[in-house]
């Protein structure tokens, strides 16, 4: 694995929201087949980093670079980043009234495959992916995120990921708001997606998701930067000792 | 919806067209009877004579013309645009061919080609029970399936209706919308020509929709169709109308009057997909009367035109009657859609629901103008009004003018009004899944329209989504 070129790499990223710096020079390199976790307390900048990487217009990248499969994504619009293979599972997915889950996914997949591509396998694909996530078939006819429970929203984010099958998926707090059964189902979905060719970046506050998805690397983010990196044991240490432990060691305040 | 936005987009690109190419084409005006510009008692008499009408109808026309002259222009709605109408410049009657066709082979090629391009013969073959095709002032093609005729269903153009069913026409004509109702109802009564006459006998269910299509071809044309639909006790019928016109630089006028009568226990649904070119004034009066336990539904889609003023109405006159008005309006560049709904509760245990959805884009303006009136005797009336406006672009405008007059204490009223914009967060969510901004915006708009489109037969839903896509092209968001 170590000889492989990075799949997804960003260097010295600086991000501002409404003139306020939220990400302060973060760098990370993810090779194919790797799972990384970014952990951090609230306000550490990890969600801002996720949004900026996907191209959210409010998260301005001031400097730095980011490449996916060798392509500079910072010059791309969000839809181009998506079609290049980047995916972001949203922490707070938006409702799109009147647009059914099936039509939404079909439109998204068509966008990825190209407008003239054959879509005759879509129904079967959707049915299978929904079944794997223990979703009722009637779910496909519901309107996107309208009246969804917290668990349904997160499960739907994972469904979008497994249908689009991106090269690189960033999961922003996909574990939050889930009960233990839903957490297991979502984790199974993520594990099923993951293979030796794609990459996964789990962004989370808590360690518990990492009981079900084993990261190769864990990074701790505080005040807009990665302050420590290690193996899976780092997550367990954090669980035990809390963020203050690292904050004290590296000399920053955990909560901003 | 079976189709997705992208498939529709692909189909649309195949057509490689916009309104001008798809609907806005025109035929030469070599008609059987062209008439002259302008309005007078002589014109009214000429129309009546050409049609060989009974004297009582001619008298009604003359009386209505006097009412039209006497009534001032409405002092509400878009008075500026209304006052720009030049009544002296309009052709009030054009008869393209001498005899109506019973088969498409009877119709001159240029007219047949026009309706072919609009997809009418194809729709007739696949899912309609009967079709009426009006071109300028008269219905040039009319046909209904034999099995419907055998059930006693009458579906004719209004001129033939008057000839063949004079007693029924005389009994109901102008009873729901009298000439005195408004200036444009008076104008229509004076110069009406064409439109549909439908009678469904007691207990008969017309299982497939009947459709009329209205085509304006000539510049400065005035089209004044008159429609009367009577569903006798326990009968059921779904009627669909569509309309288009060529693109001209000067204005044409479309001013219809539509009267529906649903007798005890009857059901009428009236669906409109209006798609006028931007030089059309569309000033239409539509009203229904629902008797005991009858249901009337207006499903009203307003696209195109320069100015539309239209407020489909249901008068609930019998106990337990139900009225529903579901409308959408799309106001694009330089357009004003002043659309809405009226419900009159005049009997106990009546219920009504108004759902109005509007989209304003660029400098377009969509207004909802509504009236709900509950009379003293309408105990236990249920009223629900929901208005939803979506704005696209900084200059788009939406107004709501709801009026409620409730004269009974035992009434349940719900009223909701919302104005929203396409949110940046929604766009980001959709674009992050690979859709371009234009595709994302279109998906959001189609979703907004979904409560309306899902009520349409599939073919019309697909067509409506295509029309919306045409309107959305080049959106500035």
Image (cartoon, coloured by chain):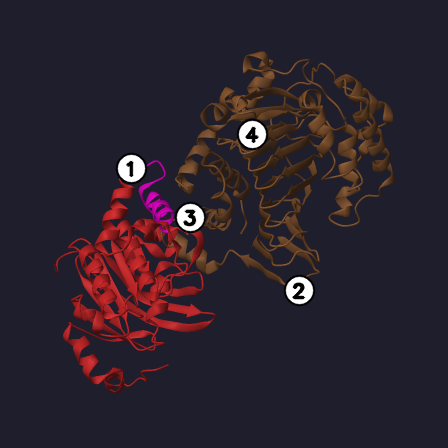
Chain colours: A red, B brown
Up-down relation of residue B445 to residue B119 (above or below) = below
Residues in magenta, as a range: A101-117
Q: Earlier in the sequence, mark 4 or mark 2?
A: 4
Left/right placement of residue B242 relative to residue A252 reads: right
Q: Are marks 2 and 3 in contact (CB under 8 Å)?
A: no
CA–CA distance in space, label 4 to label 3: 37 Å
Vertical position of residue B43 compared to residue A184: above or below: above
Looking at marks 4 and 3 on the same chain, the residue that comes earlier in the sequence is marked by: 4
Residue tagged by mark 2?
B409
Q: Where is residue B321 in the image (x, y as percent from the top left)?
A: 60, 48
Q: Which residue is drawn at 73% across and 39% down?
A: B177
Question: Distance of mark 4 from mark 2, alpha carbons?
Answer: 41 Å
Q: What element carries label 1?
A: loop
Nearest-to-viewer mark from 4 and 2: 2
Tell me which residue sits at (81%, 30%) in the image. Answer: B60
For mark 3, what is the residue?
Answer: B436
SS category of the residue bearing label 2: loop
Q: Quick check: do tags 1 and 2 share a chain?
A: no
Query: x, y (%) of residue A249?
Result: 23, 86
**Does the CB distance between marks 1 and 2 fall below 8 Å?**
no
Q: Position of residue B210 (x, y in %)?
A: 54, 29
Q: Disc 3: which chain?
A: B
Query: Visible in this render: residue B78?
Result: yes
Residue B394 or residue B134, whichever sits in front? B134
The secondary structure that dominates the magenta segment is helix
- Circle 1 is placed at which residue position? A120
Disc 2: CA contacts within 10 A as few (<14), some (14-19) or many (>=20): few
What is the C-alpha distance between the residues marked 1 and 3? 22 Å
């Amino acid at each position: 694995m170590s000889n492989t070129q990075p799949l997804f790499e960003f260097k010295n990223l600086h991000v501002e929201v409404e003139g306020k710096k939220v990400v302060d020079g973060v760098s990370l390199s993810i090779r194919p087949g790797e799972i990384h976790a970014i952990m951090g307390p609230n306000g550490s900048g990890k969600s801002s980093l996720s949004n900026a990487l996907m191209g959210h217009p409010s998260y301005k990248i001031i400097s730095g670079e980011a490449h996916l499969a060798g392509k500079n994504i910072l010059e791309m619009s969000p839809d181009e980043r998506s079609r290049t293979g980047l995916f972001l599972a949203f922490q707070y997915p938006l409702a799109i009234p009147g647009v059914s889950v099936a039509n939404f996914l079909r439109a998204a997949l068509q966008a990825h495959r190209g407008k003239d591509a054959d879509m005759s396998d879509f129904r079967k694909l959707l049915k299978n992916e929904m079944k794997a996530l223990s979703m009722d078939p009637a779910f496909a006819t519901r309107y996107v995120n309208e009246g969804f429970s917290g668990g349904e929203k997160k499960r739907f984010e994972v469904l979008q990921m497994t249908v689009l099958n991106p090269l690189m998926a960033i999961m922003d707090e996909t574990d939050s708001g889930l009960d233990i059964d839903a957490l297991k189902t979502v984790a199974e979905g993520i594990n099923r997606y993951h293979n030796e060719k794609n990459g996964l970046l789990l962004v989370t506050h808590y360690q518990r998701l990492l009981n079900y998805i084993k990261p190769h690397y864990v990074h701790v983010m505080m005040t807009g930067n990665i302050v420590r990196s290690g193996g899976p044991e780092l997550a367990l240490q954090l669980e035990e000792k809390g963020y203050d432990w690292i904050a004290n060691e590296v000399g920053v305040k955990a909560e901003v | 919806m079976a189709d997705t936005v992208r498939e529709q987009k692909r189909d649309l690109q195949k057509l490689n067209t916009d309104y001008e190419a798809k609907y806005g084409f025109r035929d030469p005006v070599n008609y059987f009877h062209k008439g002259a510009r302008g309005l007078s008692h002589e014109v009214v008499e000429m129309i009546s004579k050409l049609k060989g009408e009974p004297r009582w109808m001619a008298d009604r026309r003359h009386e209505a013309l006097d009412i039209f002259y006497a009534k001032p222009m409405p002092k509400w709605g878009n008075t500026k645009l209304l006052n720009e109408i030049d009544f002296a410049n309009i052709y009030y009657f054009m008869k393209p061919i001498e005899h109506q066709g019973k088969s498409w082979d009877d119709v001159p090629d240029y007219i047949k080609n026009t309706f072919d391009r609009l997809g009418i013969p194809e729709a007739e073959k696949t899912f309609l029970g009967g079709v009426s095709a009006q071109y300028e002032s008269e219905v040039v093609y009319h046909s209904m399936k034999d099995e419907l005729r055998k059930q006693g269903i009458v579906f004719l153009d209004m001129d033939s209706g008057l000839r063949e069913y004079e007693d029924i026409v005389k009994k109901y004509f102008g009873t729901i919308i009298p000439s005195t109702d408004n200036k444009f109802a008076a104008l229509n009564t004076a110069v009406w020509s064409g439109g549909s006459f439908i009678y469904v006998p007691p207990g008969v269910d017309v299982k497939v929709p009947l459709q009329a299509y209205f085509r304006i071809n000539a510049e400065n044309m005035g089209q004044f169709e008159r429609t009367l639909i009577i569903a006798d006790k326990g009968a059921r019928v779904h009627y669909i109308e569509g309309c288009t016109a060529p693109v001209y630089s000067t204005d044409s006028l479309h001013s219809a009057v539509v009267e529906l009568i649903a007798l005890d226990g009857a059901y009428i649904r009236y669906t409109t997909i209006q798609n006028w070119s931007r030089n059309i004034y569309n000033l239409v009066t539509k009203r229904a009367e629902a008797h005991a336990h009858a249901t009337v539904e207006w499903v009203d889609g307003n696209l195109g035109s320069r100015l539309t003023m239209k407020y489909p109405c249901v008068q609930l006159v019998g106990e337990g009657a139900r009225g529903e008005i579901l409308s959408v309006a799309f106001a694009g560049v330089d357009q004003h859609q002043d659309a809405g709904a009226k419900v009159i509760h005049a009997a106990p245990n009546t219920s009504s629901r108004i759902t109005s959805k509007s989209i304003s884009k660029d400098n377009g303006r969509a207004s909802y103008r509504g009236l709900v009136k509950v009379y003293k005797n309408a105990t236990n009336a249920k009223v629900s009004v929901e208005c939803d406006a979506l704005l696209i672009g900084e200059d788009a405008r939406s107004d709501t003018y709801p009026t409620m007059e409730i004269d009974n204490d035992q009434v349940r009223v719900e009223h909701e009004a919302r104005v929203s914009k396409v949110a940046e967060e929604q766009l980001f969510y959709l674009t992050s899944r690979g859709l371009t901004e234009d595709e994302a915006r279109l998906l959001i708009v189609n979703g907004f329209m979904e409560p309306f489109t899902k009520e349409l037969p599939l073919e019309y839903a697909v067509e409506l989504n295509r029309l919306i896509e045409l309107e959305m092209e080049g959106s500035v968001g």
